[in-house]
Amino acid sequence: MGGSSLETTPDLRSTWFVNDESALAWVYKHVSSATFKSVAQSCRMSVRRWLFSFFPVLLGLFTVGVLAQDLVLVPPSSRASTHSTCANPPMDQCAFYANCLESRYQCGPDGYAIGYGQHYCQKFSDNRGMFDAQGQQWMISTMHCLQLALVGDAIDATPPASDCQALRDQAFASHAGCYISNGFCTLGVQVWTAVLEIVDIKTLFSSWGAFKSMIQTAGECAELYAYVVEKELF
């Protein structure tokens, strides 16, 4: 017993932190390489399972971050949509004047875009109940025509109107044509009277002479011409 050559097994609980070399020697001696491989493989599998289970979470966080950034920044699609709306103003709406013309020319509350275009567009829209079905269709078509006449000023790189006065002149020049081409002459006395109650026609036609010439020469405008003469609008 006293001459035994058996090595004493270190008590790992008491020597692990006191004598690291002794503990490691014991591990290398008693733990087979197969066990090491098994443990390593088990660790790798655990890491893989963790990555596979957590990957969707990481992907979700990344997606949320991208979407949040898009919400903070102005998306190109939104800018394209605004440009598209200015290029083709929606029917029966008045936002074109503020969003497409005033935002570009900045002529203020007395400029054409806000003081005339949007003002009378909204006034006609608010009083549509004064018109019969034909009169309402004329109103909607004419409002759209007046806006289409100014699309170039809203979106062209070099717009036809170079300043506020030029924009005003160009816009008023389109009024008579839009009114007449959409059937103003055929609407009848009731609608004509309603229009006069909403706005003084001379206010909308700076080129009053052009409007007078149109209704004098257009064959279907004889009744309107007689009405205008009777009301002493000339």
Image: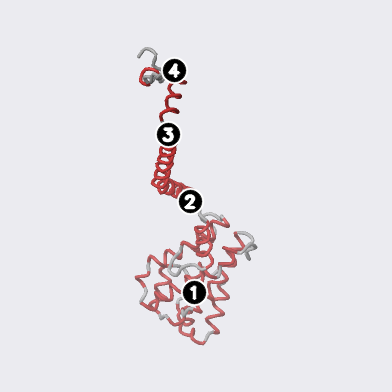
User: The N terminus is located in which quarter?
Assistant: top left
7 vs 133, nearest the viewer: 7
First-in-chain label (3 vs 4): 4
Q: Are marks 1 and 2 in contact (CB under 8 Å)?
A: no
- Residue 23: image quadrant is top left
Mark 3–mark 1 distance (CA, rounded to whole Å): 112 Å
Q: Badge 1: how crowded within 10 Å, few (<14), some, or many (20+)?
A: few
Q: Residue 32 shows which numbered tag?
A: 3
- Write the residue at 63% across / 62% down: 157
Please give the residue where the numbered disc 2 appears in the rendered image. Answer: 70
State the mark number for residue 19.
4
Give the distance between the C-alpha atoms of the residues marked 2 and 4, in whole angstroms: 59 Å
Place of residue 202 in the rendered image (x, y in percent of width and height, measured from the top left) = 51, 69
Q: Is residue 181 above or below residue 34?
A: below
Instruction: Determine the CA span between mark 3 and mark 4.
Output: 21 Å
Q: Residues within 10 Å of mark 3 (few under 14, many from 20)?
A: few
Is 67 positioned to the left or the right of 170 in the image?
A: left
Q: Name the one closer to the observer, 123 or 145.
A: 145
Q: Which residue is mark 1?
A: 233
- N-terminal of the pair, mark 3 or mark 1, is 3
In the rendered structure, which amino acid carries the disc numbered 1? Leu
Q: Position of residue 193 (x, y in %)?
A: 40, 74
Q: Along the line of sight, which residue is nearer the eye, 21 or 7?
A: 7
**Residue 92, percent across and down?**
43, 69
Q: Amino acid at mark 3?
A: Ser
Residue 42 in which image quadrant = top left
